[in-house]
Image (cartoon, rainbow, N blue to C red):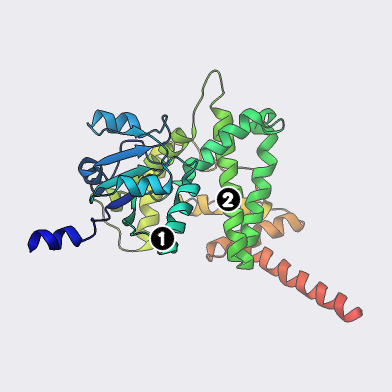
């Protein structure tokens, strides 16, 4: 009775597992469920003999057959309740998945269980690796990019920074995302050029490492034992650690003179105020000295004079456009 019932039951359909892995994660760094599935599988297939995971799977004792099965061949391999793991290779994967979909939709075959198992996931910031790779290729193959220098690109850094500020002032989220990308490109581009310096080369990793170290050092209330409960205490920590790092001879050291005039005046005023220096404004006549006094007064009251003037200028621009429209 039992043997007759067993003979009439259809064979178990088996299981097909498509095991994916992020190319942004080092090969061999697979999730524990992925390793469990690979070790327990009856058959592991990969069409790409140069797949980056293969050396690590072999080292772990996982046998991988080099094969590119059709959808029907894959179903046949699953007969008897077998588990077959497929490592997608990128080429031919679409044909395989389309074939499985057609078989499933035909209603004429008993389909095995289909599972998509991510073997690794992108970490936050993983797309930055793509940007670095794209920049490497552009630097090597683009006739324009391959000839650029730090000095030649300097003007673009200024332009992109201003366009970012404008996107922030406009409140345009899509524009903000794009302009942040343009600013990021400048950083990656300069770092790529710096790699080629014959005397003092450095890479994007060196750039990132420098700012990471700086941020940790300037936030002892986050990464150390210090405490800071208010923004004012945080700023005090920042200024102290920055002063220890720089060891400047003058409070004016490190203030770029090429920045816009109001921003320059505000920065100098901030340095003087934070250092508790009593430096009277230079006596002089003319609009320049009047603007200097206004910028110092604005900074002392917590107002960014450059941003304030930009906001006023934007209002003026809108008034001009309104007047032009009215005139029409």
Q: In which quarter of the view is residue 178 placed? A: bottom right
Which residue is the site of mark 1?
104
Image position, residue 287 (x, y; %): 76, 58
Residue 312 appears left or right of 237: right
Compared across the picture, whether 223 is left or right of 91 comes to left
Q: Can you tell which quarter of the image residue 22 is in?
A: top left
Crowd band around label 2 with a 10 angstrom C-alpha radius: few (<14), some (14–19), many (20+): some
| Nearer the observer, 34 or 153 | 34
Q: Is residue 146 above or below residue 111?
A: above
Q: Secondary structure at mark 1?
A: helix
**Mark 1 against mark 2, which lies toward the viewer?**
1
In the displayed orientation, state which residue is furthest to the right. Answer: 328
Mark nearer the N terminus (1 vs 2): 1
Task: Name the outermost residue toward the left.
Answer: 1
Query: Which of the pair 137/223 is nearer the observer?
Result: 137
Residue at 52% in and 38% down: 132
The answer to whether residue 199 is above or below residue 258 is: above
Q: CA distance from mark 1 to mark 2?
A: 43 Å
């Amino acid at each position: 009775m039992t043997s007759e019932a067993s003979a009439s039951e259809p064979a178990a359909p088996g299981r097909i597992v498509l095991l994916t892995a992020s190319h942004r994660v080092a090969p061999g760094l697979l999730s524990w469920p992925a390793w469990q599935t690979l070790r327990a599988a009856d058959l592991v297939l990969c069409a790409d003999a140069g797949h980056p995971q293969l050396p690590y799977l072999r080292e772990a004792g996982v046998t991988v057959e080099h094969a590119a099965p059709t959808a029907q061949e894959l179903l046949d391999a699953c007969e008897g309740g077998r588990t077959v793991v497929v490592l997608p290779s990128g080429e031919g994967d679409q044909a395989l998945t389309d074939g499985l979909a057609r078989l499933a939709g035909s209603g004429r075959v008993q389909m095995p269980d289909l599972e998509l198992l991510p073997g690794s996931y992108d970490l936050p910031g993983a797309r930055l690796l793509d940007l670095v790779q794209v920049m490497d290729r552009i630097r090597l193959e683009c006739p324009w990019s391959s000839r650029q220098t730090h000095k030649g690109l300097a003007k673009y850094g200024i332009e992109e920074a201003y366009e970012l500020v404008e996107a922030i002032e406009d409140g345009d989220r899509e524009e903000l995302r794009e302009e942040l990308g343009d600013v990021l490109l400048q950083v990656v581009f300069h770092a790529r050029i710096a790699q080629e310096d014959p005397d003092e080369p450095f890479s994007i990793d060196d750039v990132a490492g420098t700012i990471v170290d700086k941020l940790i050092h300037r936030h002892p209330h986050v990464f150390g034992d210090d405490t800071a409960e208010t923004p004012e205490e945080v700023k005090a920590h920042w200024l102290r650690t920055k002063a220890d790092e720089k060891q400047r001879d003058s409070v004016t050291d490190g203030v770029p003179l090429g920045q816009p005039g109001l921003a320059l005046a505000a920065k100098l005023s901030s340095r003087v105020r934070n250092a508790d220096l009593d430096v009277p404004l230079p006596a002089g006549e003319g609009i320049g000295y009047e603007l200097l006094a206004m910028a110092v007064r604005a900074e002392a009251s917590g107002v960014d004079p450059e941003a304030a003037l930009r906001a006023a200028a934007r209002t003026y621009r809108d008034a001009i456009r309104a007047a032009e429209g009215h005139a029409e």
